[in-house]
Image (tube, helix red, strand yellow):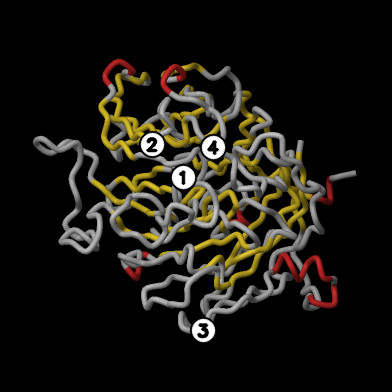
Amino acid sequence: MAVAAVSLLASSCGSGNDDRPGFGFQGTTVPDTTPGPTIEFGTAAPTASPSSAAQPMATPTVGQALEQGEENQPAPAPQPEEAVLVLTPVASLSDPMALVARPGTGGASGDLYVATREGQVWLMDADGDEPPEMVLDISDQTNPECEEGLLGIAFSPDGSKLYVSSTDLRGDSLIVEYPMSGQWVQGDQGRTVLDVDQPACNHNGGHIAFGPDGYLWIGFGDGGGRDDMFNQGQDLDTLLATMLRIDPEADGGSAYSIPADNPFADGDGRAEIWHYGARNPWRFSFDRSTDDLWIADVGQNEWEEIHVLRAADGWKPGANLGWPLFEGHVRFSGTETPDNLDFPIHVYNHDTGCSITGGHVYRGSAVPGLVGTYVFGDFCQGRLWGLTVDAQGEATRTELGLSVPGGTLVSFGEDAAGELYVLSFDDTVYRLELARSSSSVN
């Protein structure tokens, strides 16, 4: 069982030709997974943010400061009583990939459904008292190799339909809708909503979620390879390297429809696109309290990044996430700096990790000290971190002191009550919990 000491201080807010280790790259040695120093909330140095889109620059991250020594850290402030965080195993499944709660079901937690990479969906007991029960099997329709397989699931806001994101046997991306009957998925009644060609086996993205607006959001990577070799990142005529927003309900002869307020609904780009310039958005989520959209985008040579698109800004329709013009805050290619660039609120370099796994802003009640903290991690290192952002937009990353084996931290999930789950390719679903006061630990 993984354990960490943290302060109960409320937060202030394809082909394998990508030679960097990360999700789906087989046989690659991952970095040392020994967790770094445990830093209490409020003691880490803030991450500098670019002062304007016209003046991007590479700035040290909290992770860099931690590794450069204590001289870079402010003096610790007096802290409240410490508490112990644990990752408690609640289910054993082969390569769990995504976890969602079905709206309107299962009491406080909601009925929890877990997708596995090989193409199955399981109904999971939130308390781990009963073994998971399989409710959908599309393993004969997908190939869990490279970065492919069943990649994401989402329920419609009323819980009547399950949407499944996967790659098919050709390696192309599919979004399929299945009706529900009781707790069961009607697997023989699938309807294809979206089919997108993928030129390589990596950078598929594939995460899906319904936003607070009731529409289905989809994240796709740049088509794979490396260096944006297919020139998708800044191309508005492709659905790759984008965040999409659609109404997945069939509309006459169309499998889905376009919300009228999508930024390119009237032209100048594919109407489905909301954001573009993503390299491989590996998990995004909406803060259930503020509706802000958090996007974790996997980097290439050096920088992993997190973007926050504020609900107060309408999630910045048409925002350019920068790839391949920039990796993090650093120029990667070209010379232009478009006015609609959205620079990340936080980056960390490959001395700290090598493939970001996005999570959720914690809004549960089990760990009061984490409320308002974005919990995320790194696939290669297996470490979990918390990120808080102050009123001036300065981000502070904190070591949670928790980890899973290196090369396994693939996803996070959230139940109906806002409690967080960690999905690991060590074939385990964990729940993040507060164990007991450190004063009671021998």
Residue sitting nearer the eye, 214 or 419: 214
- Residue annotated with mark 2: 173
Q: Mark 2 and 3 residues: CB-CB less than 8 Å, in contact? A: no
The amino acid type, in three-letter code, at marker 3 is Gln
Q: Mark 3 and 4 residues: CB-CB less than 8 Å, in contact? A: no
The N terminus lies in which quarter of the figure?
top right
For the residues labelled 1 and 2, the Cα–Cα distance comes to 9 Å
Q: Which numbered dot is residue 147?
A: 4
The residue sitting at 75% across, 60% down in the picture is 351
Q: Secondary structure at mark 1?
A: loop
The amino acid type, in three-letter code, at marker 1 is Gly
For the residues labelled 4 and 1, the Cα–Cα distance comes to 9 Å
- Residue annotated with mark 3: 55
Earlier residue among tags 1 and 3: 3
For the residues labelled 4 and 2, the Cα–Cα distance comes to 11 Å
For the residues labelled 3 and 4, the Cα–Cα distance comes to 35 Å
Earlier residue among tags 3 and 4: 3
For the residues labelled 1 and 3, the Cα–Cα distance comes to 29 Å
Residue 13 visible from this viewpoint: no
Q: Position of residue 304 (x, y in %)?
A: 60, 59
Give the vertical position of 247 relative to 77 (above or below).
above
The C terminus lies in which quarter of the figure?
top right
Q: Secondary structure at mark 3?
A: loop
Q: Mark 1 and 2 residues: CB-CB less than 8 Å, in contact? A: yes
Give the vertical position of 195 relative to 46 (above or below).
above
Q: Residues within 10 Å of mark 2 (few under 14, many from 20)?
A: many
Residue sitting nearer the eye, 386 or 246: 246
Q: Position of residue 59 (x, y in %)?
A: 64, 76
- Residue annotated with mark 1: 205
Q: Mark 1 and 3 residues: CB-CB less than 8 Å, in contact? A: no
